[in-house]
Image (cartoon, rainbow, N blue to C red):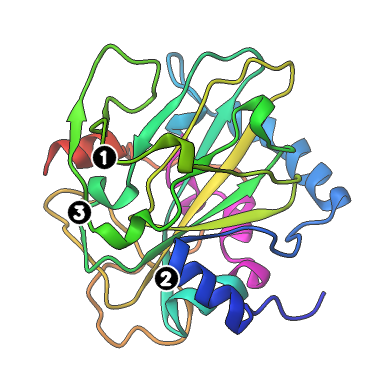
Amino acid sequence: MGSFALSKEQKEFYGQYGYLLGLPRIYTPREMERINAELPRLLALLRPGETAKDIREWHETSTYLFEIVMNPRIHDLVEGILGPNFYCWASSFFIKEPFSQSTVGWHQDAYYWPMAPHHTVTVWLAFDDVDEENGGMKVIPGSHLHGLLKHRRSVETTSVLTLELETGIFQESDAVQFRLKAGEVSLHDDRCVHSSPANPSARRRAGLTIRYSGTEVKNDLGVNPNFKAYLCRGVDEFHLNPAGTPPVERYGRPAFSAISIEEAGAAR
């Protein structure tokens, strides 16, 4: 496959609306079959009481995931948003099994993260076909232009996040539904308001989120002391974050438990 570089029009759309769809397929159907066939080997490393959402930053210890987050096709897309110098610092799974009632409430990623300035893009890689029937993500176009919005804590929710955006800040009727084929990705800004509903269908909805930031973005090690930056392209001219070491095992889990976005949000 050739370059996946974004066009001028795609960059302008992202700047105006905070997300991108309709991008070239990163992995062919056959490649995704292979990737999905390996996923159970990673899930087998979960401990009793853990779920797929506990697979956070395992790209640091699994070449299986490290190869994905370092895919040059993905980097072509990200470079069009972040520029020539950027690093990867996080990955996590969001898997909704068939008939799952679990949701993800409306939120902004940047609200949770102890990082500044805000210059991060999330790549959402679909492991399955994703649409409105099996709990595909929705975004509020242009919401990233309004800065960080007020969030509230709620324990009476089906959301995997208990810290959600306050109601009445936006109209859900303005939301755009994401539809992706397995092997495709979407991009969204770290301040873009988004959520996903339950999965009442008989189809799984699995996706891997990958976070990339410009090298000028600094993590607060007082909140997230295990933070590691893996330079993807260009040079790290600022040296603000500890550099990660590429993994050597095919499947492995970190010795520490990566900080969850809930824990980071609680530190605000």
- Relative to 4, 60 lies left or right: left
Which secondary structure lies at badge 3? loop
Q: Residue at x 33, y 77 (%)?
A: 215
First in residue order: circle 2 vs circle 1: 2
Residue 258 coordinates in the image, percent (x, y): 33, 41
Q: Residue at x 67, y 70 (%)?
A: 73
- Queried whether the magenta region covers residue 39, the answer comes back as no
Q: Is residue 10 above or below residue 90?
A: below
| Three-letter residue code for mark 3 | Pro
Image quarter of the C terminus: top left
Which residue was labeled with disc 1?
169
First in residue order: circle 1 vs circle 3: 3
Between tags 2 and 3, which lies in front?
Answer: 3
Residue 142 coordinates in the image, percent (x, y): 40, 58
| Three-letter residue code for mark 1 | Ile
Q: Residue at x 54, y 20 (%)?
A: 198
Q: Is residue 175 above or below residue 79?
A: above
Which residue was labeled with disc 2?
87
Disc on res. 114: 3
Image quadrant in which you'd find residue 22: bottom right
Between tags 1 and 3, which lies in front?
Answer: 1
- Relative to 259, 14 lies left or right: right
* Front in this rendered view, residue 85 or 205: 205
| Three-letter residue code for mark 2 | Tyr
What range of the chain is rendered magenta?
55-75
* Front in this rendered view, residue 192 or 54: 192
Whether residue 81 is visible, yes or no, is: yes
